[in-house]
Image: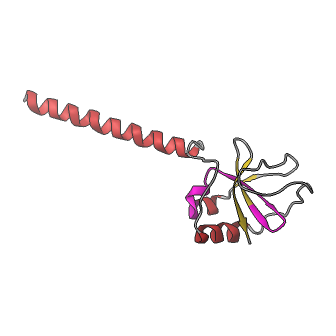
Amino acid sequence: MKTRTAIALAAALLLSGATAASAAEVASSHSGAKQSSTLDLTRAQQKTAWKDMSGASMQNAPADFKAATGAAVPTALKVSAVPAKTARAVPALRSYDFAKIQGKLLIVNPKDRTIAEVISG
């Protein structure tokens, strides 16, 4: 009887630990903990993002701004969260923002406003 109780207790502890780890992983993915300074989207993912977000308002960037990976987005440009539909289709974009300028879609890390990827139409 003691052996069964010990096994049941061990199983319960193991299960509760796995549940806590799973919950922590979900929470970190929503908090942006998995963001990186650059992305490496496939061409198919880029096409999906472009299609989903191409209707966003085009903005005029400052004349001296060069849209390149790693560049800081000027404060004059408004960035918005990636739409939920796009984040579902391309999960890597879930915690990023974006801006659209001069025929380019900028994927922006919201923590430091640097460009993680530039997608051209």
Quadrant of the image containing the C terminus = bottom right
Residue furthest right in the image? 63
Q: Which residue occupies the extreme top position in the image?
A: 2
Residue 64 image offset from top left, x and y in percent: 90, 54
Residue 101 on the magenta segment: yes
**Residue shown at the point (16%, 34%) measured from the top left:** 7
Relative to the observer, which residue lies in front, 23 or 92?
92
Answer above or below: position of 6 versus 44.
above
The quadrant in which residue 103 appears is bottom right
Q: Is residue 60 left or right of residue 113?
A: right
Colour scheme shown: secondary structure
**Does 5 appear in magenta?**
no
Numbered disc total: 0
Task: Measuring from the top left, give residue 59's x and y in whole percent.
Answer: 87, 60
- Residue, x 80% and y 49% (percent of image)? 73
Q: Is residue 102 left or right of residue 22?
A: right
**Image point (75%, 69%), residue name:** 54
**In the rendered view, does 78 fall on the left or right side of 81?**
right
Residue 77 lies left or right of residue 51; in this view the side is right
Task: Say if 51 sits above or below 118 in the image.
Answer: below
User: In the image, residue 61 lies at what x, y percent?
Assistant: 88, 57
Q: Residue at x 7, y 30 (%)?
A: 1
Q: Where on the picture, by quarter, is residue 11?
A: top left
Q: Relative to the observer, which residue lies in front, 121 or 20?
A: 121
First to last magenta residue range: 88-105
